[in-house]
Amino acid sequence: MSSLPNPALLRTLLLGAVLVAALVAGGPSVAAPTDPPAADRVGVASDPAALGLAEPPALAPPDPETAKAEAERIADGLRCPVCQGLSVADSNADAAVAMYARIAELVRLGYSQEQIEDYFVDRYGEWVRLDPPVEGLHWLLWVAPALLAVVGAAAIALRARGQAPTPARPPAGTPTSGGAPAAAASAGEGADPADRHRAAVLAALGEDGR
Amino acid sequence: MKVRWGILAGGLVVVGGLLAVLASGFGGTTQGVSNNLLGRPAPPFAMEVLGERETIVRTAALTGAPVVLNFWSTWCQPCVLEHPHLLAAAQEFGPRGVKFYGVLYNDEPQKAERFLAEKGQGFPVLHDPLQRVAIDYGVTGVPETFVLDKEGRIAHKFIGPVSVGELQAVLRPLL
Amino acid sequence: MISLLGRAVVLLGLAACATGAVTGLIAALRQSPEALRLTRALAYVFAGSMVLATGLMEAALLTHDFSVSYVAEVGSLSTPTWVTVVSLWSSLNGSILLWGLVLGLFVGAFTYVTTDKNPLQTPWALSMALLVGVFFTFLVAGVANPFAPSPEPIPADGPGPNPLLQNHVLMVIHPPFLYLGYVGMTIPFAMGCAALLAGRLDAAWVRGLRSWMLVPWGFLTVGIILGGWWSYEVLGWGGWWAWDPVENASFLPWLTATAFLHSAMVMERKEQLRGWTLSLVLATFLLTLLGTFMTRSGIFNSVHSFTESPIGPVFLAFLAVALIGSLALLAFRIDALGPVEDAVGGGITRDTAFSFNNLLFTNFTFVVLVGTVYPLLNEAITGKQISVGEPWFDRYTAPLGLLLVFLMGVGPALPWGRSASAGQLKKIGGAGLISLVVAGLCVAVGLRKVWPVATISMAAFALLLTLDAMWAPAAARAQAKGEALGAAAWAVARSARRRYGGYIVHIGVLIIAVAHASATAWQTKETLTLRQGESGQFAGMEVRYEGSAWQEQPHRRSLVANFALLGPEGLIGTVSPRLNHYKKMGTPIGTPEVRTGLTEDLYFSLVNVDPAVGLASVEVHRKPLVVWLWIGGLVMLAGTVISAWPAGRARAAAGPA
């Protein structure tokens, strides 16, 4: 591989970046240093039929501010195809930049999140979604953590049953500090705040001194 | 000795499942991407031909004959390896009506022209500066090769380098 | 020459390890002091040979001895010396050798520290630790042999290590910390197995277990945070955590180890949760193995992982043996520890808080494990590849994290074993009220996102109660003994060092939670494409592109783009993010420039530069509070050191055996 920087390649990419920026902004094309008509003539025309999408846009074209936020939200949930687990929104790899441009374009035309995600799933497979939909086997993925939480909480509740704490019971298992914790415990409920604090100290010392 | 059979059985089920899943990971592709475009009309495009700025190839003009669309770049080693295979396939199927196009992916045109001058060019190469067509086709890396049938539907997709034999097997039934 | 010598040293280590594992077994079964002495000696031989082997590899790297295959793989005459030194862990085979070194050091230290006070468990523990050593030295001697001679002809120069790893100095310290954390978990595992095998888990052994867990836990904590920092400073996307399989791999054992550190307190205090706590010890080690397998086998694709290698299947086999062996050990021996009371008291007590703490950590571990492994499961069943990424992980981990922060506050405020008094409940309620006020203030100043505001509010709650738990005993002592408050605080903190260290760790976690939530929720980002001399607007500031220049270094060329930052009052500063072109790679790797501040970071990552036409495209991020992630990490480290620092001889002697 070439170790030399590649001015012409960079120029191409840069022109790309400029055009993408223009597309995202939805404004007039930024004047690029190389001659711009090429951009109008090549690539894909912006009418829905030519985008290779079966359906027309589901929504009316949004205003630019909403469009930007929407594009970012959608890009957050799609995986950059050449990166390692990064989303299209996070990555600045060329492919991610190109994907983001396409997302922004489709949003501006009024395509819904669902339509845009389907467009990418058609091309890159389910793999492109960072958040798998709740269907089929994926139910497992969605339900299992909650199930474990419920089972665990139930187990704790069951085990604790019949073990209700007795208010006067001294903390068990503090052989070193002898009677101190017991004294502390009984003093713990005492009216005198100083006693209570002393008890706290002794309990702390007792615990750590072991 | 008292044995906790419950722990053992439950644990073995979980551990066995985990190990089986991990073992299944061997030999799989690490970053495979499926493509649902197969059998559907190919996304339309209009791209400039490399070295002939005024010539633009549009999908509309491609129906009626099978098309081979090869995404490549000069910096990718497998692309260099598959180049002679594509040339051979173009030589065999070009006269029988199949149209071959290369699509330059994330690369500079001058370098591609130099590459083609050196290694031989059997078909036109198109320029996709923003990777827009690549995105439309779901390309994740190079080389990837799409075969379109006479009606302009995607009949086959190759990920990685193709050989003459593989192309023959896909193209012959389409003629 | 070094090839031969290195191989010999590794084989010596393997022999010592294998023999030691057997003599340890004999010492355990026959209660033989001679066998134990021999085992100790062999453990030292193992440690020594690992140190020597690593030294030989470093010598080979530094002298550019390309006849050693590993040097030919990662060495290069043009890399700076520090890169050459750290090349040891830049590729698979070297990193396994580093693993062996760290294991050798831990086993050596454990052998040195462990006295003969626990004649029942010690030989078992040594035997188990050496058994793990056998596996890793076997890897170094066999499938992952870094000392293998290079095939003829011996190259005159090598390609140098992966450019991503030579891009930042953090790469020097991040992997060793992670390894110290990972490999260190072997010792608690060996001790846990020893307790089960010997059928004895007494107070001294539990204390040792906790210390030997706390040390690698601290290293792992720092390693994970350094990894995030590296990602932030090097990778150029402006983030520190992406729920990438390899990040998850390091996080999983951290979670179970953290659960252990908490449940061990219950075990120490009340002799409860023994089986559960030992399961956490074993699980932690097994998860480090799983994590290593994930990074080394190539079945998960990730930034950090090494490419597909033949050690995958070998590792999986070892993982299987370790998993099944641990299960059998638990199932057969758990009752040998004596009557096990696995129940924990209920009611509004600290015991309950600990139970839920463990439930939450277990659940957290489960979520991360399921999310990481599920794509493999799905592919095995349906044949389709899917991704489980940040949105999924955030959905589950955010509430779990929030609940943990809640417990972090409530736990220390509740008494052990008996229901909380009205006063204690009132204190908790007061903190709750204040945290609601904090939430209200956030909303009032315009912070409207639910999760980060909830995090800030909950963190305030936990911080108040943590500070109170630290403060109250000091105030009580000052009052009881008539001491000055400072002196009393010092005396209390000294005598309850473990506890105070723990609280400080908690404060570090709270800082990180707030910083992470805020930085993620309130970041802004813009891509500016500028011509030379042109300015773009970002966050109330002007970013002007000043031009670019090439910078030549022996191992790389860098294209540096200079930007001036202008505020209303004039020049704020300049930034120079770069794109580095390494010999080995076609695509350049960026070095972002980060302007770090106490309240926010400005992050500049170069996307493209074209010197010929004077155009540059730069991504600018504004992220609040990022620096507090690293500060929080330091606080956690400080707390860990305070907590783990060995007690003085006198104190140790005074304590019960």
Image (cartoon, rainbow, N blue to C red):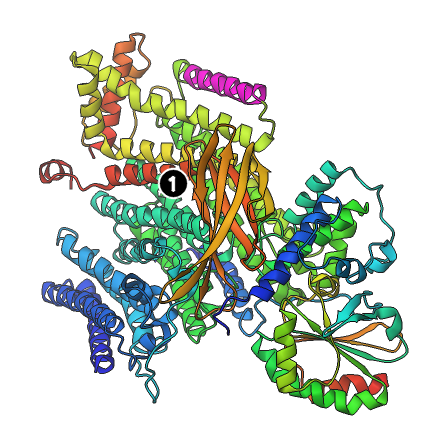
Q: Is residue A45 magenta?
A: no
| Closer to us: C455 or C151 | C151
Within 10 angstroms of label 1, few (less than 14), some, or many (20 or more) residues? many
Q: Is residue C433 magenta?
A: yes
Disc count in the image?
1
Magenta stretch: dominant secondary structure: helix
Q: In the image, residue C68 lies at what x, y percent?
A: 29, 79
Q: Which residues are magenta?
A: C425-445
Classify C197 as above or below B162: above
Q: Seen in the image, is C232 located left or right of residue A35?
A: left
**Quadrant (top left, top right, bottom left, bottom right) of the C terminus of chain B:** bottom right
User: Splitting the image into 4 quarters, where does residue C70 fall?
Assistant: bottom left
Q: Residue at x 43, y 76 (%)?
A: C310
Which residue is disc 1 drawn over? Answer: C630
Q: Is residue A129 left or right of residue C444?
A: right
Q: Position of residue C347 (x, y in %)?
A: 45, 26
Instruction: Locate the N terminus of chain B and report the quarter of the image it occupies.
Output: bottom left
Please, is residue B175 above or below residue A200 in the view? below
Residue A158 seen in the current view: no
| Kind of element beneath mark 1 | helix
Query: Residue C621: x percent and y percent?
Result: 53, 42
In this rendering, the answer to whether C521 lies above or below C607 is above
Depth check: give the residue in front, C550 or C176. Answer: C550
Q: Residue A171 at what x, y percent from top left? A: 30, 27
Q: Is residue C176 above or below residue C314?
A: above
Q: Is residue C556 visible?
A: yes
- From the viewer's perspective, tell me whether residue A51 is left or right of residue A117: right
Q: Give, as a three-letter code, the residue at label 1.
A: Trp
